[in-house]
Amino acid sequence: MSNLIRNPVATILATVATPKYKPAPEIAYFSARGPSQNSENLIKPDIAAPGVNILAAWMGNDSDIAPQSKDPSMFNVISGTSMSCPNVSGVAAVVKSHNPSFGPSEIKSAIMTTGSDRNYCPNQSFSLRCLELTGKSR
């Protein structure tokens, strides 16, 4: 296990760049919004989860992001669906652990029906369900 980190440390550098997204709880500018491109009657996405500026594991040999005289970090702050997916997967695992007989459709239904309604797209005629882990989801 050469990637074992006993004392994880991350360096967060100050930036002068203005982010293109609004702080939470806004849907990121790069996120997909419904209705589906394939069918106007199909609202997508099914659920929204945190995926902006997530501190995540990173390839330790990426020296491009390391400050001078510092070893490359094993962590990085990144954004995207690859960051929101683990949040949904974790909730799915909790739902499954409390309901071992649930199949994929039942797990998806439990996540979707216990999420919080949020209207992040006021110019759209729908609201979005946001991931939420409560006693109801289990």
Image (spheres, helix red, strand yellow):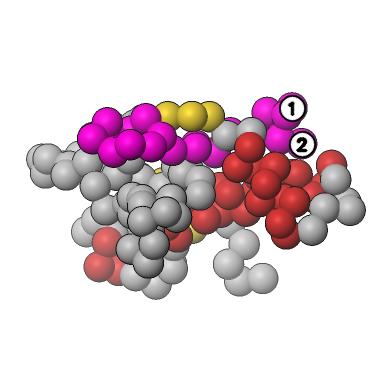
Q: Residues within 10 Å of mark 2 (few under 14, many from 20)?
A: some
Asked whether the residues under the numbered discs 1 and 2 touch, taking CB atoms below 8 Å apart as contact, a structural biologist would say yes
* Residues at marks 1 and 2, CA–CA distance in whole angstroms: 5 Å
**Image quadrant assignment for residue 134:** top right
Q: Residue at x 85, y 45 (%)?
A: 99
- Which quarter of the rendering shows the C terminus? top right
Image-based side of 69 in relation to 43, left or right? left
* In the depicted structure, whether residue 69 falls above or below residue 91: below
User: In the image, 40: left or right of 134?
Assistant: left
Pick the residue in front: 27 or 106: 106
Q: Which x, y percent locates residue 127?
A: 41, 35
Q: How busy is the neighbourhood of tag 1: few (under 14 within 10 Å), some, or many (20 plus)?
A: few
Image quadrant of residue 26?
A: top left
Residue 12's tag is: none
Q: Amino acid under label 1?
A: Gly
Which span is picked out in magenta?
Answer: 119-138
Residue 69 seen from this side: no
Q: The N terminus lies in which quarter of the figure? A: bottom right
The residue carrying mark 1 is: 135
Residue 88 position (above or below residue 60): above
> Residue 138 — which label?
2
Q: Is residue 128 magenta?
A: yes
Q: Position of residue 117 (x, y in %)?
A: 49, 29
Q: Residue at x 24, y 47 (%)?
A: 29
